[in-house]
Image (cartoon, grey):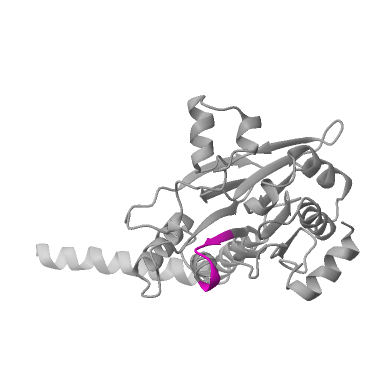
Amino acid sequence: MSEAKVREVSRHKGTAQRASASPRSAGATHPGYKREQNEDAFWADEELGIWVVADGLGGHQAGEIASQTVVEEIQRSAATDRHYERALQRAHALLLGDEQSTGNMGSTAVVVAEDNSYFHVYWVGDSRAYLWTPGAGHGQLKQLTSDHSYVQMLVDSGAINSTEAANHPNRHVITRCIGGSTNPKLEIDRVSSPWSPGQRLLLCSDGLSSEVEPDQIAQILAENRNNRRAAELLVGAALDAGGKDNITVQVIDAPTAVPTAHKKWTSRTGSALRASAQILKQHGKLLLLLGTLGLVAVVAARLIGAS
């Protein structure tokens, strides 16, 4: 499907949204052809270095509530403590305690948080993060996350191979999600890696990864350096494959310099140090005189006390 067709379909079915106006990252989402509602959600703040994709479970409004709850807790954490594992735990507790919950309302999540020249990926469920590195051919596409799913358990145990997994009838059954059960404890997996120039991260719901082969994903990323176009073409590829599920993607470029949030911090710190140095320079003699007088007063007090 062409980029123009994706935009046309989006006008009628509610998608193809950019995560931000900045060219460093972009996202798009689409309900697909089989679902009436889009239960996926995504959000990004490039200045803070945070991106999230959540895939809601439960049908109707339940899935939308679940994925939006995840996004809202990540937003709250981004603005305060930046402890994203705690944010996912809070979302889990909220969904378990929601009066509207029918016991199966939940969400997957994949979160990327930038830390200077490193990035950290947190995930629950089968939403994925891929790292694309430029190179020969279409470059290298590496899956950073491992699905929390029944089929992945079979693959890990050696019961089936990756080819059988791709066509397994239970490939959409997940073993871990935010909310969705009565288990109060949520396990969150994490992986960290340094950025390298030219690399890109892809976050996606299983509406992309279940429908589009990794080779095609790598080709789209290699041939489209514009993130908005790449995101829309990835969604288009999933629609061409049938669009059987909601589809959400975010494409993120490696930073070319120290992230903005870090620059602001160092700038404020540097300004404070320079201001302190200027005060010392201007009032150094006065401070020295006051210090000397203080010392004289202490000595005099001791002499008087001794006498």
Q: Is residue 166 left or right of residue 178?
A: right
Q: Quadrant of the C terminus?
A: bottom left
Q: Residue furthest top?
A: 158
Residue at position x 82%, y 69% in the image: 9
Segment tinted magenta in the rendering: 54-61
Q: Is residue 163 left or right of residue 289?
A: right
47 shown above or below 149:
below
Residue 63 place in picture, x, y as percent: 53, 66
Foreground residue, 59 or 43? Answer: 59
Residue 295 place in picture, x, y as percent: 31, 64
Residue at position x 68%, y 46% in the image: 209
Residue 244 place in picture, x, y as percent: 69, 56
Q: Is residue 198 in view from this perspective?
A: no
Foreground residue, 11 or 102? Answer: 102
Q: Residue furthest front?
A: 169
296 shown above or below 181:
below
Per the image, is 56 magenta?
yes
Foreground residue, 76 or 90? Answer: 90
Q: Is residue 211 left or right of residue 107?
A: right
Q: Is residue 207 in view from this perspective?
A: yes
Q: Quadrant of the N terminus?
A: bottom right
Residue 134 place in picture, x, y as percent: 81, 37
Q: Is residue 23 left or right of residue 170?
A: right
Per the image, is 229 magenta?
no
Quarter-of-image position of residue 181: bottom left
